[in-house]
Amino acid sequence: MKLPSRLPVWSITCPIAAWVLLVLNFTGHGVGLGGLFEVLLVSGLVAGVLAAVFHTEVVAHRVGEPYGTLVLALAVTGIEVALIVSLMIAGGEAASGLARDTVFASVMIILNGMVGLCLLTGGRRHGEQTFGLFGVSTALATLAAISVLALVLPNYTTTILGPFYSSSQLIFIAVVSLVLYGTFILVQTVRHRDYFLPVVAEADEEVHAPPPSNQMASLSAALLLVCLGAVVLLAKALSPALEMAVASMGAPKTVVGIIIALVVLLPESIAAYHAARANRLQTSLNLALGSALASIGLTIPAVALVSLMTGWTLSLGIDAKSTVLLVLSLFVASLSLGTGRTTVMQGTVHLVIFAVYLFTAIVP
């Protein structure tokens, strides 16, 4: 996307309109409109997503890679963590499995849906795409370690039976998650930043275009947070209607969490899709894998802290079906992203696994 010299009006008015709709929803002034107001909420959500993608491009172009992709991943994850924590506090111990379901859904959506779509799109348009193998393998190794330690190992510890960690184990896993994610950020941005830099084509006008001014980038960064906040809160506001729709179809309640996770991850997904379509697969994979790492690496310590402070038991272990799908996804990702070259074949495999995940969530 070629950036304009100044922010377009729609990129400023869209987040404002989204927040106006949120205020009307919270104050109850939109109830009288009935179904029309829900349509307006959906429209505000879509507008917020599109504005978030635009402001991400502005900030990313100003700070450069890999910092640009890190900005969006941390912004989305920070708001996602705040939402999960607030829902846990509001729902009490009954919401002890909320963090597990959300984190697992995010990992599956990113690792199979987002990555698969990017590989398929890039492969169709450019035939074969390349990326830096060292950076991607570093991200995959870190993601595999945190995912298994946080979501699988609790099923096999014996201090407390079931999908739970004891207090000391929970503290240890939270610290380990922070250490792994913090080390990854250090490697990505300082120690081995070159591992995550894309190979820039000489004719790539988007990369060589003049960066936006500091003032424009700062305003976009602020508006990005405003957009992401609106997207998450609108998704939450629409969740009762989603729950009714899912219940009417006879599908499990976990489907609601998947839909909300899909909405929250839309800005990153669209940005990653645009990068893959423009033959910048490295940027696309930085966005996808970085988002997955931020989601699990920051959410687990946050919800562990809430659990320890409130005394609620935190359910982290996923069931056997989910474990098989998670292990399969990590194994396939290590193979498909293990050569530094991808085609439509790898994208198709990831999307098939994603389709199986969605189908078995609806028909367990």
Image (cartoon, rainbow, N blue to C red):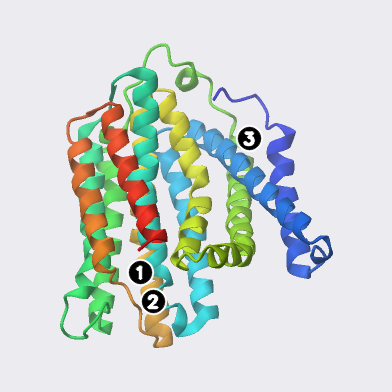
Quarter of the picture containing the C terminus is bottom left
Drawn side of residue 85 relative to residue 336, left or right: right
The disc label shown at residue 301, or none: 1
Q: What amino acid is labelled 3 in the image?
A: Met
**Between residues 109 and 142, which one lies in front from this camera angle?**
109
Q: Earlier in the sequence, mark 3 or mark 1?
A: 3
Residue 3: where, in percent of width, then height? 59, 25
Q: As rendered, which of 242 and 287 lies closer to the eye?
A: 242
Closer to the chain start, of discs 3 and 2, is: 3
- Few, some or many residues within 10 Å of mark 1 (<14, 14–19, 20+): many
Q: Position of residue 114 (x, y in %)?
A: 39, 42
Question: Residue 45: horizontal and vertical position, in percent?
Answer: 64, 50
Give the number of the mark in front: 3 or 2.
2
Label 2 neighbour load within 10 Å: few <14, some 14-19, many 20+: some
Q: Which residue is mark 2?
A: 305
Please report the residue visible at 45 percent of the width from the left and 56 percent of the height from the top: 77
Task: Please tell me which residue is depicted at 26% across the width and 56% down the height of the picture.
Answer: 326
Which structural element holds mark 2?
A: helix
Side (left or right) of 34 relative to 335: right
Three-letter amino acid code of the residue under disc 1: Pro
Q: Secondary structure at mark 3?
A: helix
Which residue position is annotated with label 3?
216
Callout 1 secondary element: helix
